[in-house]
Amino acid sequence: MAKTKQEIAVTFWGVRGSTPCANKENMEYGGNTTCLEINVPRTDEVLILDSGTGIRNLGNKIIDRPGKIRGRIFITHPHWDHIQGFPFFKPIYGSKNHFSIHMPDQGKEGGCKDILDGHLTKTFFPVTLDMIDANLEYITQPPERLEYKGYDVDFMLANHTIETAIYKIFIDGKEIVFCPDNELILKESKKSDYDVRLEAFLNGVDLLIHDGQYNRESYKEKKGWGHSAWEDVVELAIRLNIKRLFITHHDPDSDDKQLGALDDHLEEEYGSAFEEIGLAKEGYQINL
């Protein structure tokens, strides 16, 4: 009898951009900053993208697993909202556990370990890297496709204010792109080399999770901040035949009423163009 194919599960643990917000009007969509978990079939290893404050709840969920906890954390870039949950991720304090931490090179600021070491100093936080009990491996991620246990990871640089990865995950013939910080600049004239590479990287993927912090009106005052208008994201996704689209990195001042209205609009206006479209919501799981 043929084995049943296991589903790939993608869970949002943090979807907020810039800063966490614990206001009651933000609780439906979530107040924690960026963190994504991908369940990879046929492996017990944990696959995590970004370590915003949402990673704390993920850690609380998996901390009681029997035996060693192993996994990889792919950090898109070291802005606070993408790393501020890292020292609150309880599994890194278990001496039997092992995690590989991946991050793009940050030029003069250094590689993955240099960046985290600079953030976790006694000046800013009571725990330093050498006080963490788990076996941690720090990897300055090269911009190329690499093979891991049960999946491959590729990345290209985003249009953001520092070196930021757009990660592309390949699992069992499915392609997932995680792009929480990226500024789309759609041009009517000739496309730049970057535009061509970005479109090739995103074309036809099964799931795109993309920054849509602003709308086109609010974006006018925030050009160059490294974030996108959701309308541009939808337009691009339709043109590139993307199957599922979830918009993330919600502005901390966007409350549940605003986000709910936008979520309904996305489904009503664009639902027929996708297998699934919506706003990322803390706790929501996508099955591929």
Image (spheres, rainbow, N blue to C red):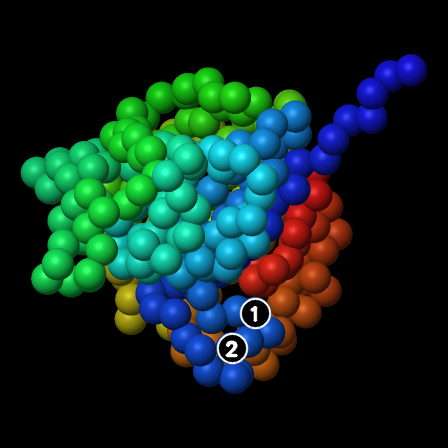
Q: Residue furthest top?
A: 1
Disc 1 to disc 2, how far (Cα)?
Answer: 6 Å
Q: What secondary structure is found at the residue carrying circle 2?
A: helix
Considering depth in this image, is 288 or 269 the residue closer to the camera? 288
Q: Identify which residue is drawn at 20% across, 61% down.
A: 125
Residue 128 image position (x, y, % from top left)? 19, 50
Q: Position of residue 156 (x, y in %)?
A: 35, 32
Q: Quadrant of the N terminus?
A: top right
The residue tagged 2 is 26
Q: Decide if residue 67 is on the left or right side of residue 265.
A: left
Q: Give me the residue at 23% from left, 47% from top.
A: 131
Q: Is residue 197 left or right of residue 168?
A: left
Residue drawn at (32%, 54%), measured in percent from left and top? Answer: 87
Amino acid at the residue labelled 1: Tyr
Q: Are marks 1 and 2 in contact (CB under 8 Å)?
A: yes
Quarter of the image with the C terminus is top right
x and y, in percent, of residue 160 in the image: 28, 49
- Residue drawn 53% across and 69% down? 30
Q: Nearer the viewer, residue 66 or 120?
A: 66
Image coords of residue 43 (percent x, y): 60, 27
Circle 1 SS class:
loop
| Residue furthest to the right | 1
Instruction: Please state the total of marks drawn on the protein image.
Output: 2
Q: Nearer the viewer, residue 32 or 262?
A: 32
Location of mark 1 (residue): 29
* Rendered view: 223 above or below 45: below
Does residue 162 sit above or below 23 in this rendering?
above
At label 2, which amino acid type do we have? Asn
The part of the image, by quadrant, that contains residue 215 is bottom left
Crowd rating for badge 2 (residues with CA inside 10 Å; few <14, some 14–19, many 20+): many
Q: Let me know if residue 90 appears in the view.
A: yes
Q: Is residue 188 left or right of residue 273?
A: left
